[in-house]
Amino acid sequence: MGKKQLMKGNEAIAEAAVQAGCKTYFGYPITPASEVIEYLSWRLSEAGGEFVQAESEVAAINMVQGSAACGVRTMTGTSSPGMSLKQEGISYIAANELPCVLINVQRGGPGLGGLGPAQGDYFQAVKGGGHGDYRTIVLAPSTVQEAADLVMEAFDLADLYCNPVMVLTDGILGQMMEVVQFKSGTQRELPVKDWAVKGSAEHADGQRRIVTSYYLDSEKFEKFVKHLGEKYAQIQKAEQRWEEYLTDDAEYLIVGFGTCGRIAKSTVQMARKEGIKLGVIRPISLWPFPVEAFAKDVKGYLTVELSLGQMIEDVKLAVGDTTPVEFYGRQGGMVPTPEELLEQVKEKFDLK
Amino acid sequence: MGKKQLMKGNEAIAEAAVQAGCKTYFGYPITPASEVIEYLSWRLSEAGGEFVQAESEVAAINMVQGSAACGVRTMTGTSSPGMSLKQEGISYIAANELPCVLINVQRGGPGLGGLGPAQGDYFQAVKGGGHGDYRTIVLAPSTVQEAADLVMEAFDLADLYCNPVMVLTDGILGQMMEVVQFKSGTQRELPVKDWAVKGSAEHADGQRRIVTSYYLDSEKFEKFVKHLGEKYAQIQKAEQRWEEYLTDDAEYLIVGFGTCGRIAKSTVQMARKEGIKLGVIRPISLWPFPVEAFAKDVKGYLTVELSLGQMIEDVKLAVGDTTPVEFYGRQGGMVPTPEELLEQVKEKFDLK
Amino acid sequence: MAKIVVKREVCKGCRLCLDECPKKIIGIEENANSHGYYPAVLLDESKCLGCSMCALICPDVAIEVYK
Amino acid sequence: MAKIVVKREVCKGCRLCLDECPKKIIGIEENANSHGYYPAVLLDESKCLGCSMCALICPDVAIEVYK
Amino acid sequence: METRMLFAGFGGQGLLFMGKVLAYTGMLLDKQVSWIPSYGPEMRGGTANCSVVISDEEIASPIVNRPDILVAMNQPSLDKFGQAVRSDGVIIVNSSIVKDVPVFSQCKVLQVSANDLAHDLGSVKIANMVILGTLLKETDIVKIEDVHSALAEIIPAGRQQILEMNKKAIQTGFELSV
Amino acid sequence: METRMLFAGFGGQGLLFMGKVLAYTGMLLDKQVSWIPSYGPEMRGGTANCSVVISDEEIASPIVNRPDILVAMNQPSLDKFGQAVRSDGVIIVNSSIVKDVPVFSQCKVLQVSANDLAHDLGSVKIANMVILGTLLKETDIVKIEDVHSALAEIIPAGRQQILEMNKKAIQTGFELSV
Amino acid sequence: MNKVFDKTKGLTDVKTHYCPGCTHGIIHRIIGEILEEKNLLGQTIGVTPVGCAGFAERYFNCDMVGAAHGRASAVATGVKRSLSDKVVFTYQGDGDLASIGTAEAIHSAARGELITVIFVNNAIYGMTGGQMAPTTLPEQKTSTSPHGRSIEKAGFPLDMPKILSQIEGAAYIASGSVDSPKSIIQAKKYIEKAFDTQLAGKGFSFVSLLSTCPTNWGLSPRDAINWLQENMIPYYTLGELKTWK
Amino acid sequence: MNKVFDKTKGLTDVKTHYCPGCTHGIIHRIIGEILEEKNLLGQTIGVTPVGCAGFAERYFNCDMVGAAHGRASAVATGVKRSLSDKVVFTYQGDGDLASIGTAEAIHSAARGELITVIFVNNAIYGMTGGQMAPTTLPEQKTSTSPHGRSIEKAGFPLDMPKILSQIEGAAYIASGSVDSPKSIIQAKKYIEKAFDTQLAGKGFSFVSLLSTCPTNWGLSPRDAINWLQENMIPYYTLGELKTWK
Ligand SMILES: Cc1ncc(C[n+]2csc(CCOP(=O)(O)OP(=O)(O)O)c2C)c(N)n1
Ligand SMILES: Cc1ncc(C[n+]2csc(CCOP(=O)(O)OP(=O)(O)O)c2C)c(N)n1
Ligand code: SF4
Ligand code: SF4
Ligand code: SF4
Ligand code: SF4
Ligand code: SF4
Ligand code: SF4
Ligand SMILES: [Mg+2]
Ligand SMILES: [Mg+2]
């Protein structure tokens, strides 16, 4: 474990990438994600990598595709509108089964919107904003330390499944400084990237490599899509992650990811003082959604999001319609207070 | 009603737009949607409108924003990868509350994929592939006539709710010729577009108009997002559309939109001959999803999609977990046969 | 006979007008305006040419010129 | 002494080589290949210069030249 | 009544047009019709086909997996789709091109040397219309006069000659005894 | 123990730095810390603020809605956040700038003419450190020596003079009797 | 005494959010003056970028539309094609127009779109806190080129007016600066000609103006102007690069 | 007799899907020959576009990556930055490079990216069935300009080599054609120099080649070549527009 550092979330993400062996970064500045690109603009070349400030997010994601096709660990980062522009590229990368890491430091949308923290890109990230049948693994940290850890993990998962992995944070987490210590990379065994292009003379088998996603033949294409489907099913089984906070005896649960999950913990502390048995489920992997976490015998769930309600669909799908699933959201860069959430718990579940 | 014409779906869409008073079209060619732009390249100027072949889908959607801001009926069309590129623009248009019509003639994804028919852009269309909290009304025709009708309807809905409306078809429907008759525009009363820019001298009140989606103040922004939320709730209440086929006495229902809905009808005809009480729910509005259609007392649903399964989430959310909801999908441009679906119904519900 | 009037609440105290004035007769006020900026002020009306150099360079259109 | 050999299954019968040949000694076969194309064929080997003009223009690299 | 047809062959053999003529005729007769082409990059060279359904009622699935009528203008098409033809269906083969016609026990097979006949009429390009003529005779989907009316509407005025050639080719196919 | 602090004022008054020094000190003491700035276009001109939490345990919500300590470096900040301070909390006001200090019944209010004191020390820029000194004295979050160590790490070696000035300003604030 | 210099009606009374000494404000003023002088305010639609000028819809006293980052020329195309009798202009930064919006700018020019594009080149991304722009000079330090723009890694600055002047559909291309009263007067003439080009239906019109960003250059407003004069003016092609008269 | 002309090892044995007489095939051949002659096949990564050449990964006998429509230069950038010792080229159509990929092409040039871009200008969107391209000539009929490209509405063709030659980071810009053995030999020299530019680390290299699309022009292969000679050659700037030697 490295030494303790006080770092912004964005910087920690950038440094974690370097420590995970990221060799190329392609990005375009945008508030509140710019520290990622700023940090890597000097740090990456220091670490022997290559940094390109692309002409646009569209160019950046396609550079990532090129770099990932070479079997190199590569990353791009942006905030909401920029992520919208990357959707075609992400779909291509998923279709080419290339590993890479994507950072979205969400801000308020739709449109130009505002720069405040938000979680309105949940659907885009989790259901897939690009065209066609593909999935992006999505990880949502709630502390700077976790952001760093999940970025390192993201590189591993990307390599493991040959799939893009997104780390989904928000403006608060991006701008916030907390103490972080970088772990040494996981010792997981990762598949050899012998599909990568690097000039056919470099391949042990002397065969040339082709990375494309074009199918002229529907039958072959269907086979490929079904292969993707199987891979996704496998990920859904193996990679659900979440944190539970005082759920053991809980009668009510707040469900919130990222910043909301943290605020909810404060709410729980307050609730417990009042004798309300409240707990928190904080989904960490948003896709695969941690359905396993919801095999609980409680009286009700309150889903809290910085949006009009998006994750709540997945909560409902996980919970079924036997237990009530309520919603409370703030939007536009506004963030609920712990008091506010407690108020909501009481109101929604008639605890007054 | 106009005279009968034998037309491709794409041409019917284009002609319907002209008949609905569409004044501008901005597009970029792509198979299998190109007939839309080809048809309008001559037809629109003939009808006194303006046609621009944009340099890209990104440019096209932003031209649409400019045109819609002028209060003019405007449209763009594309196929899957092109629609991915439009996501930022769609989010802006939704945030600016501008009416416009978007056509997606889906092909197989992800990536470059194939040109066959597909429904893999359901999530992108329905959940919103762009950033932030917004919704696009999505209409899915299954015949050329319905495509024409829904395009005309789309322009009305767009104006009514100041919102983008997407007509989601696929390669088969786009390339297929059927008989179509153009209805005269609905006589619905539509709000006056006095928010449109046209030069302040043109405004009755002499005040200048501003169309933007930039918010510096989170509280104001939240208010705006909540206003959007209310609008969407209203649309969800008022605009659910679907077709039912032999559902009255049905014990099992196939749920499929577009081409799948049509194939399912053939399956029902076959099933009925064998004494199986099968029916079809064909969602026409995909957003708002026709939850009302699912207040049925049946033994099971089979959702059929040309994807790995996307709409099934909405079906499950509508049905709850008391009735089984099964899935059958084909991908990559492959299309199930009616026989195949009957087989699936029997298998999934143990009817052999 | 000429003069300038600086709209003190509009001025951001950038000092560009100070240098641009051929007569160097613009100075900075001692007190900040309500936005925390120290506005420009005409120091010696008698020397003002009304040449508008100051107004032309002012990014905030904070200067009116009289002649 | 020179000649060309047209790979008849590769040739698409585009006729570009016919015009390009300075000796105009390339013609088209009567029978289609398995792709439905009518391939080019050298009509008069004795006149061939081996100049490769035909090969240079052939978009399908269907011509081999011997000299 | 509903007839489901598949027209298959090489690109350039006029398959899409053949299907369109039938569909158009159906429309003029106030029937329900659908016409689906194969499309995409395969259009250039390679195979092309189109599915046509003509029906008295609403057409549920417009996709033709099991045709009542198959027109096979080349060998691969016959090999690929021949078995799928319904029992009591008809296969019409362009025997000028398709040399190897296996036995299909489930249905009738008609062989028309359409290219040769069309060549004699002045252009191999109208081989498709010869086949169409045979199809019209062998089935009762639409009447030959109706097809003539449809053709007159589809072919732009001023191209009288083409219209006449097409009609003649249909007539030839119609009068064949196969 | 957990202390939640809010530092608010104009951009350029060194609020973010003040918060950072405290957070850094907390880290050196192995405490949990969080620091959140306001960000965005408002950063240019307008108001700026930052929230700092220093805690012995895991910090649940890092967002400070109800501070234990508020530093108000201008009038709007005091007006906006004063009421939110917890009972038994502390408000430290830069009285060189904030002229209108209402009564807050729930908490203690300390007025420090930080700009004037800083001016006397050589630069108004270190008004923030004067306030920090007072804050350190009035609360027991961290010790003044720890802050000095933190400062020594934060301020790049070679900028000794700045370090010394900052320390002096802290000392001045610390020794004030308010 | 008469008022010989007053704020134009082409601008609203809203105080701008620009940093002290930022010359965006000067460019705003001269555009506003021309719209007023030519009596176009009631028939003009302006399109704002995303960038520091992203709030300019509050400042220009005419109908305004906000575009997505880089897409102002496309949005303006949509507006002009819908309202062909109106005057349409965009106001775009160098990140907006020369980076993410390159294709939109070039193709609006190629189409000969009847719009006027004002391009503000301050060699940096102002709004987002000073990152490198395509127009950042070699060795210039920015937050994404902290050791100075490396020609080897990041290449050379783009000279947009020079590039656009190669395009046939572009009818008027001029490149100026706003670093002194003299250059400001010149710049204003360019902008006037650009609007004239549009009014005469001659084709695409474009004015590039060198501008300062004291905040992100880390210089006082005056030093920023000096830096512009000493570094940017020698680097970029200036003058009228293409005219139609 | 010796074989004096044989198919290059730079191409695979796969039969192309190009239409009869389409000169895409000629361009493939000369690229393949150069890669073979320079012994680069084992160390080259090619990037294909979306367009008729979208299947070219089957034809070039080296490692290949397929890019999204218009983004080949960006993908190539990603490849080159990851494998700086390898040779990287793109093969892009005029829709791909001069329309949707304009920004990527221009900025690869501006960055002086060490890649070689082969630009195939056939004045049309071949793959999608003959729509207008940015390079479609005035009055040329296409499926989206059925009455001929209107200068008034659709503007003027883009001359990409001319534009790119204005960019400092571009080290080698040439513009040729493949309408005759002579021009093909010339074109091959250009391509060779382009690869030499990359190998020498001089900067961005670019070769534009006029090419036919008999199918969508509605002409026989020969007539298509004639049309190219009579119409495209006079219109477009040809020759070496920028060299470094
Ligand atoms: C799609 C997208 N990418 C990035 C941003 C972030 N962004 C906002 S303004 C800007 C650049 C501003 O620079 P410039 O255009 O030069 O204008 P200036 O602020 O310098 O006047 C960027 C990158 C955004 N809003 N949207
Ligand atoms: C994002 C996107 N938009 C549009 C298309 C459709 N498309 C495929 S190729 C092409 C243009 C082909 O023209 P060109 O680049 O000139 O190549 P050519 O076929 O003429 O060689 C287009 C528009 C696509 N695949 N992806
Ligand atoms: S008008 Fe001229 S002389 Fe008077 S203050 Fe302004 S610049 Fe100076
Ligand atoms: S130039 Fe304008 S804003 Fe700047 S100091 Fe002078 S009056 Fe004030
Ligand atoms: S080598 Fe020359 S002479 Fe011989 S066939 Fe070819 S072009 Fe004709
Ligand atoms: S040029 Fe080549 S493809 Fe064309 S006819 Fe001659 S040999 Fe055949
Ligand atoms: S950041 Fe730069 S460009 Fe933006 S307002 Fe401030 S000085 Fe002007
Ligand atoms: S469509 Fe045109 S460019 Fe494409 S292969 Fe055919 S002839 Fe060549
Ligand atoms: Mg700038
Ligand atoms: Mg082309």
Image (spheres, coloured by chain):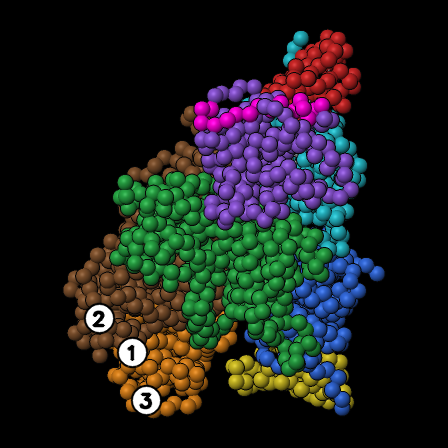
Chain colours: A brown, B green, C yellow, D red, E purple, F orange, G blue, H cyan
Q: Quadrant of residue F133?
A: bottom left
Query: Residue A269: which disc?
Result: 2
Query: Residue F68: which disc?
Result: 1
What is the three-letter code of the residue carrying label 1? Asp
Vertical comparison of B180 with G212: above or below: above
Find the distance from the CA under tag 3 to the CA under tag 2.
27 Å
- Chain letter of the residue carrying label 1: F
Q: Which residue is mark 3?
A: F104
Q: Residues within 10 Å of mark 3 (few under 14, many from 20)?
A: some
Tell if the residue under mark 3 belongs to the same chain as the one under mark 2. no
**Which range of residues does the magenta coloring cover?**
E104-120
What is the three-letter code of the residue carrying label 2? Gln
- Chain letter of the residue carrying label 2: A
Place of residue A346 in the rendered image (x, y in percent of width and height, measured from the top left): 24, 75
Q: Relative to E100, is B301 on the left or the right?
A: left
Place of residue G47 in the rendered image (x, y in percent of width and height, measured from the top left): 63, 67
Residue H53 located within the stretch drawn in magenta: no
Check if mark 1's residue and mark 3's residue have beta carbons within 8 Å. no
